[in-house]
Image (spheres, rainbow, N blue to C red):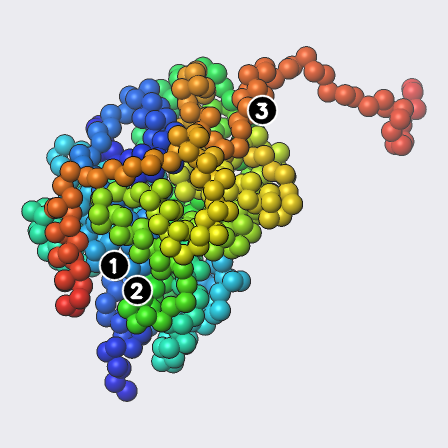
Amino acid sequence: MTLDPNSVYAKITSELPGGDKLRTCLQCGMCGGSCPSGEDMDHTPRKLFAMIAAGQDREVLRSNTFWYCVSCYLCTVRCPQEIPITDIMYHLKHQAIEKGLYTTDAVDFSQTFVGLVENYGRAFEFGLATQFYLTHHPLGGLKMGPMALAMMSRGRLNLRPTRIKAIRQLKNILNRAKEIGAGS
Amino acid sequence: MKYAYYPGCSSESSASAYDVTSRTVASALGLEMEEIKDWNCCGATEYFSIDHLPAYSLIARNLALIDPQETPQVVAPCSACYVNLKKTDENMAKYGQLNADVNEALAAGNLSYVPGTVKTRHLLDVIVNDVDPDVMASKVVKPLTGLTLVPYYGCYIGRPEGSFDDVENPQTMDRLLEGLGATVPDYSLKSSCCGGHMTQIGTDVAMGILRRLIDLADRLGADAMVVPCPMCQLNLDVYQSYVNKAFGASYKMPIVYFTQMMGLAFGMDPAELRFEEGVVPVKSMLEKWRTPVSSTKKRKVRDKKALPMPQALPD
């Protein structure tokens, strides 16, 4: 059987460093059983890997599983086959974004965060919170108001971003990385 | 030895207390740490979701800015920064294609990095494993005797692939806090996740995770939870009132950095240790610490006659 090079399975095993280990999944379920947010997922990682192997790409990329991943690496350290599961979850987010098949705010949160980092070279918590909530959750933002005030009054929220000096250099590096990534 | 220091973005805002006390404590222990000039963000857990190659390249720029002859090790106090720097270095060493791609990207900024030349260390690791125990002991002038402190490591100490502590049952901070004189209960959730960015994007998931962590610490009689990570501190401290609201609870668990507690034990002025930056007040913990453990308070001994036990007859 030849594998469609655009399939989720092929992309993980060819594009992601260490992703080829997915081939060795035993379906033991240690990952799902260890996951702190597993109960909120449509499918546990184990089941998702079976679906990936079965070529159910659309269902895979539309599932909420990887969006609920908290990146704690517990599955990764427990996996008897040493599959980099957390990295695979990151890569599935990447693929879902690429194909426009997501139904979540998480991607907007990530994109807002990354956009600020690309512009300033540093994360900007206040900018992230205001941009994210005002754009996506004006009402949710209100709920977060007391928290923001509590942090501000304790000097824990900078209202201005810090820009690194060599921001041009950083942008050149990131742009080149994106070109290389797109070409591979 | 001199270390390169990577403060991480939270040092500039939400976790400035951690940054300030990390520097103070390190200098008290004679650890020389030089901040990387013009360092950039590590991308946290967000950039990898968008695209892994720019994410690795972003992180690698920091490693490339370090002169390995001068400082062959970089210290990160933030666990998320630590895990990202370490993972980038290790994966670049492991995967040739990744190394080539990242270096090609770095070249666009006239930089390069040879994997393996700069070792990433967590501040907790350096403090516990590099400092002479006798030096450490000599600094403890106001021990934390009488305080029950729960060590909460969060998920990144020892992950993703082993390092200075066990991946499931880390001990470094237990030993440190015991050395400072505190009582340290066995906290079985010590390396469970705090929910990370879930407080922002999936509040309901985060609330359940946080409640479990605080509740166990509370039941163990903790005066505070001690953390080595700004994300854990933020979630447990700043969102604690939201957890209380969501579950009708009334937790008042102070969430402090291990460096703040070291400063206390080293006799530094609590006002300089930035405890007031915590949203949950630390006042009662500090008061308890100031009150000497009274050895005069005698343990109540029950009247033997009151016990429903058989008693030996007098000879």
Residue A7 position within the rendered picture, expressed as x and y whole percent measured from the top left:
29, 77
Is B93 placed above or below B190 here? below
Neighbourhood count class around disc 3 (C-alpha, 10 Å): few under 14, some 14–19, many 20 upward: few
Q: Few, some or many C-alpha atoms within 10 Å of disc 2 (few <14, some 14-19, many ≥20)? A: many
| Rendered view: B231 above or below B94 | above
Is residue B214 among the parts visible in the rendering?
Answer: yes
* Disc 1 residue crowd, few under 14, some 14–19, many 20+, Cα 10 Å: many
Are dots 2 and 1 in contact, CB under 8 Å?
yes
Residue furthest toward the bottom? A1
Q: Where is residue A181 in the image (x, y as percent from the top left)?
A: 18, 63
Write down the chain letter for disc 3: B
Task: Give SS at disc 1.
Answer: helix
Kind of residue indicated by mark 3:
Ser
Of the pair B88 and A62, the residue shown nearer to us:
A62
Q: Disc 2 marks which residue? A: A94
Q: Which chain carries label 2?
A: A
